[in-house]
Image (spheres, rainbow, N blue to C red):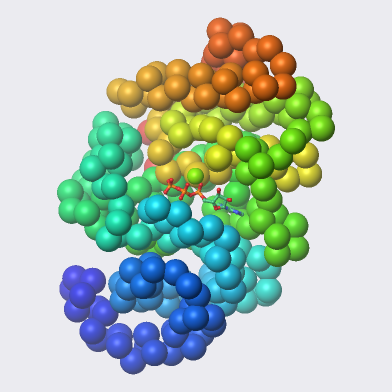
Amino acid sequence: MDVEERVSRLEVELEKLRSRVRGVEDLKVASEVFDKATLLTLYELANRGYIDVMQGVIKTGKESNVFFARDPDGNPLAVKIHRVATSDFRAMTRYIEGDPRFPKMRRTRRGIVYTWVRKEFKNLERAHLAGVRVPRPVAFRNNVLVMEFIGEDDRAAPMLRQVELANAEEFFNELLSNLRRLYCVANLVHADLSEYNILVRDAKPVIIDLSSGVLRTHPLAQEFFARDVANLVRYFRRYFSVEYNEVYSYITSCGGRHGVPEDSQR
Ligand SMILES: Nc1ncnc2c1ncn2[C@@H]1O[C@H](COP(=O)(O)OP(=O)(O)OP(=O)(O)O)[C@@H](O)[C@H]1O
Ligand SMILES: [Mg+2]
C-alpha cells in the first residue's frame, strides 16, 4: 500500500488528528508542511505515544519547520518536519550516497527526504551514544523527527551566532571536546557545522542539525570535515586567535578512544 492509499483509508483518523494536534490549523505556516502524508505521519507518532500536542513554531526554515510539542507526560519536545515539496533533494544525495547505512534508498523526492530524516535520527543516536551534547533522539517516521527540546521552560536555546559569549575560551574548549567525541567515538563528521547549528544552553554548546552528517568512511568526509573546521575557526576568530591546523589535529587525535563500529546499524 502506498502513502496515498493509506491516506485515503485513514481520512477519518486524520480528522481526529486535526483536533488532537491542537493549534496546527491556525499556525501561520505554509500549508505544504501539513500535507496529508505528514498529518498521517504525525497521527501515527501521536498514536504510538510519542507526541501528545503540537504547541507552536520554533523555526520556519527553507526546507524544514521545527515545532515545540509535548509528550503525553507533558515533557517538552522538538519536532522537526521536512517539507517534501520544497526540499533540495538533489543536494541531499551527495551526503547520502556512499553511506553503507542506506544501501537501498528510493531515488524519488520523497524517498530521499525520508532517508535524510532517518539519517539525522541515526546520527543523533550515534552521537548521543558517544556522549556528545546533541538533542536526545526520541523517534522518527517518514519526514518527521522527534527529539529532546533544547531550551529553558518553553523558550528555545539561542543559536551561537545570536549570543555574545562571556567566556568564549571555555565554550570553545567544550565544543572542541564534543567535536572530538563526535569524530573519534561516534565516527561522524557533522558536515554542516556553523554558528547556526550550535545552540547555547547553560553557557555550553549543544550541536544540532545532524542530517548532513556522514560516517568518517564516506567518500567526501574529509572535504566536509575541512569545511567544518574552517567555519569554526572563522567564527571564533572574533573572540581570539585560532589556528586551523591546531583545531584540525585536536579533533582528529583520537588516541585510545573506541568508536561506535562503522558497521553498527545505528
Ligand atoms: N532540539 C531542538 N530544540 C530547540 N530548538 C531547536 C531544536 N532543533 C532545532 N531547533 C531550532 O530550529 C532551528 C532549525 O533547526 P535545524 O538547524 O535542525 O534545521 P534546518 O537548519 O532547517 O535544517 P536543514 O538546513 O538541514 O533543513 C535551529 O536553528 C534551532 O533554533
Ligand atoms: Mg540548521
In the picture, the quarter occupied by the N terminus is: bottom left
Q: Is residue 176 above or below residue 46?
A: above
Look at 40% across and 38% down and name the residue there.
Answer: 212
Look at 37% across and 85% down and name the residue there.
Answer: 14
Looking at this rendering, what residue extends furthest in the right direction?
166
- Percent x, y of residue 173: 72, 23
- Percent x, y of residue 237: 65, 18
- Percent x, y of residue 58: 57, 60
Lateral position of residue 235 relative to residue 32, left or right: right
Q: Is residue 127 above or below residue 40?
A: above
- Percent x, y of residue 231: 52, 24
Q: In this view, does 5 lie above or below 120?
A: below
Hey, which quadrant is residue 75 in on the image? Answer: bottom right
Look at 30% across and 56% down and name the residue there.
Answer: 86
Number of disc labels: 0
Lateral position of residue 226 relative to residue 105, left or right: right
Q: Nearer the viewer, residue 125 or 54?
A: 54
Lateral position of residue 202 relative to residue 94, left or right: right
In the picture, the quarter occupied by the C terminus is: top left
Q: Residue 33, can we see it? A: yes
Q: Residue 259, can we see it? A: no
